[in-house]
Amino acid sequence: MAAVLPVAGRAGALQPRDGDALGRLATAKLLGETVSYGYNVRDALTSISSPRFSQQLRYAAGAAAPCYNGNIAEAVTQGNKYAYIYDNANRLTSAKYTPSAGDADYSATYAYDRNSNITALTRKGLKDIFGNYGPVDDLTMLYDGNRLWRVSDHADEVLLENSGNLRNPEIFDPSETQFDYDSNGNTVKDLSRNIEKMDYNTINLPPSARLVQGTDRLSGRKTNQSIGYTYDASGVRHRVIHATQPLLGTMPMRIATADTTDYVGNYVIRNGQIDKILTPYGYLQGGKFHTWIHDYQGNVAVVVVGDSVAQRNSYYPYGLPHVTGLIKLQSPSATSVTGNPYKYGGKEFDTFGGADLYDFHARYHAPSTGRFMTVDPMAEKYLGISPYIYCAGNPIAYIDPDGMQIFVNIDDMIYYYREIEKGEYWLVDEDGNEYQGADQFALAVINALDMLRSGDIGSSLVNDLVSSTKCFNIIPSEDGWFKGSEDVVNEVSCFTIGWDPHSTIGGPSESDDGTVSNYRPSFVGLGHELAHGWDRIYGLWDETPWYNYDLEVKDKRDIFAIHVENMIRAEHNLPLRYAYDKDALRSRCLIGGTVSVYYAPYRYVKTKF
C-alpha cells in the first residue's frame, strides 16, 4: 500500500522497504528512485544499485589486498575505486584512488600515534581550474598529549572554492599559537581553519566563533567574519548567523551583511523565508522534492530532483568532499555550500570563512584533520583512544551518527534497541553487550518493536527514531503517553514514553462488519506514542487546540499520531480508529471508514493476509 506521513502539512513519502528471504533490506523505494542492496554469505553489504547511483564493496574476494576481518578492502563507486590499507590496529593508512576514466586522483595516506591521533596526512586532488591533479595537502601534526597544537602543510596552497585547504599560519607568523583549549578540552582557537576565538556554553557547544581577519581574493576588501549559534537547553541547534563586516577605510565600500538560518522542527528558514522542509529522505525546496541517495555509510552521494541529478558528492576518508569540475576562486564572503549542504553522514557542512565543520549535533567535526573540536563525552569508556579522533582511526568501517537510539532503563542500566545482526534487533548496553536478563517489561518492548518493524510503516517509524539524533526512553506506565520535553536519565538526555504492555484498550474503532470496539493491541499503542516522538523531532508538533472533552482541551498532536496508528492498523489488517475518543463528532478522523479527514485524500488500505 502507499505509505505516507505528512511533513510540514504536505505529503512526504515514508521509505517503503522490502526484505529478502533472510530478512535483510533488499530494496528501498524513494521518490523517483528505487535502491537495491546485495549481501555476501556473511550478511555484509556488498552492493548498492539504483538508476543514478552504484557502489560495490569488496572485502576479500576480488580485492587486490583482501581483508578477512570485516574491513572493507575496496569500494567502487560509479566505477571509481578506492583501495584501502590498514595497520595492525585496524587504522586506515592508505586510500588509493583509481578513476573509471581520466586522470583524477583523490588518494590519501595517514599515520598515527599510539592514541590514534593523526600525525601525518597527505591528500591528492584537483589543484587548479585547468584540471590538474596532484598533492593538495601534506600535513604534519604535532600534539601535547591528545591536544593538537600545530599543523604544518608542506603542499602548495590550493585557491579553489570549498577545497578544504588549511591555512598555514607559518606563512604569516611562525611564532603565533595555532591552537588553544579551555579547561574542558574544547578547541577555542584553530588558526588552521581560520577560527581565532570560539566560545562554549555549559554543554560544550559553541555559541559563537570569530574568524581570522581575511581578504576577499576577488575584491581585495578586508573583512571581519563571525559565526553565531543558538541552542536550546538540550543542545538542539535552532539558529546560525554568518556575519561579514568589511573594515572601515577599505575599498570598495560595502555594508555589513548577516545571513541567518533558523531551524524550526523540520523547517529551515533562511533570512525569514522558508528555504527547505526536511524529511529523513530529502527535502522540499521551491515546490520540488530533493531526494537523497546514500552510500553504504549514509553519506549523501546523489541528490535527485524530478528526473535529473542536481548534485553528486564523493568523499575522502574522514569526510572531506572531493573538489570536482571547474571551480571558482574562493570568496570569503560566501556563506556556505550552496544547494544541498548535507554531506558526510548526512550532516550539514558549513564552509563559511574557511571553518569547514560538520555539525554532528553533540560535537563539530573537522574533516580536513579527521578530528572533533571537543572531547568525546564517553571518553572514559575508551581510555586507549584519543577523545578527539573520529571513529578510532577507521572511518571506512565505522561511522559516528550520534544516534541516541530507543532505550529501556533496567535497574539503572541503559539498554539500547539496536540491530545486532542484519534484520535482527535486541537490547544492548553501551559496550554492545546483549541483554541476557528476563525483565518482562524489557522483553515486551522488544516484542512490540519487532511487531511494528514487521510492517512497512512501523519499520520506517522505528528505524527513523533509532537512527535519529534524539533519545527515547520507554518506561512502564498504566496508560500511554509521550512527554514532549526532555529529561536526563543516567546522564542521557531523552524524551520519555509511557507504555503499558498489558493494555489492549484504545480509541474507538470499527470493523468491516460495523462492529465498534475499543480493542487495540499493545504494540499499536506503542506505535501511537512513537508517532508522537517522530512528530516531535521531524514534524510540526502542533500544540494548538483541537477540541474540548470533559473540560479538557485536546490539542492537534494526536491528529498526526492517530494517522500513523491507522497506517499501522491497516498493514496489520486491524479495524481502523475512526475517532480519538467517545466524542466521535468532534474527534472524528475518518470519512467513509477508510479516508483520512485531515490527510485527505489518503486512504488506509488494509493488508490481506
Image: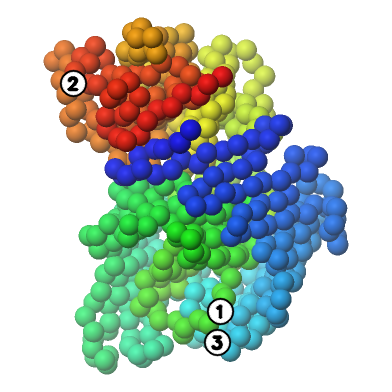
Mark yes or no: residue 190 visible. yes
Q: Closer to the camera, 234 or 490?
A: 234
Q: Determine which residue is flagged by label 3.
A: 129
Please, what is the three-letter code of the amino acid marked with disc 2? Arg
Label of residue 414 in the image: none
Q: Quadrant of residue 433?
A: top right
Side of 513 relative to 366 (left or right): left
Please state the horizontal and vertical placement of residue 132, each as a whole percent of the image: 64, 86
Query: Which label's residue is closer to the chain start, 3 or 2?
Result: 3
Q: Sort mark 2 into few (<14), some (14-19) or many (20+) by Cα contacts within 10 Å.
A: some
Please, what is the three-letter code of the amino acid marked with disc 3? Ile
Please state the horizontal and vertical placement of residue 531, each as a whole percent of the image: 40, 30
Q: Determine which residue is flagged by label 1.
A: 325
Q: Residue at x 38, y 85 (%)?
A: 216
Label of residue 586 in the image: 2
Q: Secondary structure at mark 3?
A: loop
Q: Sort mark 1 into few (<14), some (14-19) or many (20+) by Cα contacts within 10 Å.
A: few
Q: Closer to the observer: label 1 or label 3?
A: 1
